[in-house]
Image (spheres, rainbow, N blue to C red):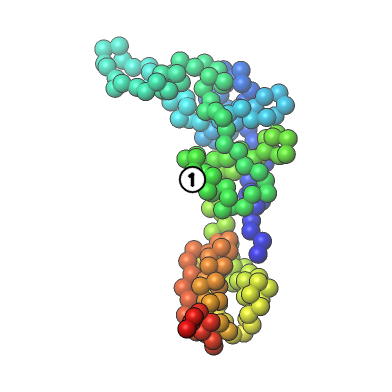
Amino acid sequence: MKHREVRELMTREVVTVPSNAPFKEIARTLMEHKVSAVPVVDQSGHPLGVISERDLLPKSAGQSDYFRSLPEREAWQEDKAAGTRAEELMSSPPVCARPDWTVAEAARLMEAQGVKRLLVVDDSDVLIGIVSRRDLLRIFLRDDEDIRHEIMADVLDLSLRQSPSAITVAVTDGRVELHGTVDFRSLVPLIERLCRTVDGVVSVTQHLGYAIDDTNSA
């Protein structure tokens, strides 16, 4: 099975700012390009960090009414409020991915790091793209017939050598239903597990029988 790679989903034309970019230039860049974050890069295109709207917000929050007190802020918020250049405002180090990573690999890193986007770098660690949560969700827009064909051809025929005519595969809005009979009982959970790994699959329900129970150790 061929899983979709980050290179197929990432945005290649990435808006960036240099490390010495002033606060207002960064804010203007976000507004003009209608993005919520920009990578900070050095002169060679290596990412140094990321500046998001969240990094700029403490500056606005610090401009309070003289006569009105504000809630206590954390140290990082005070640092961001005092920052005036990209290198002082960015979140660093950046969380990066490789273009040949699968969607699952990228999603796991996003979840583990608690970030909304990954910077994509090449073998020289030069920025070549950016991939967001929304980009990764695009795999669920796959056509049902494409998903069905991949299950029939790649999972059942090529991977497991099962006759596609013995198993009926129905896909509706990414939900897979399997009916039919397989050779061995041990294949049932394997088929279900492999179907779940197909890009775009939302759920798998199986109603599979078997000819031989090869799981009975007696």
Above or below 115: residue 183? below
The residue pinned by badge 1 equals 111
| Rendered residue at 66%/43% (across/down) | 98
Above or below 150: residue 9? above
The x and y percentages for residue 61 are 38, 22
Quadrant containing the N terminus is bottom right
Residue 125 appears in the figure: yes
- Of 58 and 63, nearer the camera is 58
- Of 11 and 202, nearer the camera is 202
| Rendered residue at 53%/77% (across/down) | 186
Task: Residue at the far bottom: name it.
Answer: 211
The x and y percentages for residue 138 are 56, 54
| Rendered residue at 51%/84% (across/down) | 213
Which quadrant would residue 40 be assigned to in this image? top right
Q: Is residue 61 left or right of residue 156?
A: left
Above or below 112: residue 169? below
User: In what element is the residue under mark 1?
Assistant: helix
Above or below 130: residue 91? above
Q: Is residue 40 left or right of residue 71?
A: right
Residue 30 appears in the figure: no
The x and y percentages for residue 143 are 58, 65
- Of 30 and 117, nearer the camera is 117
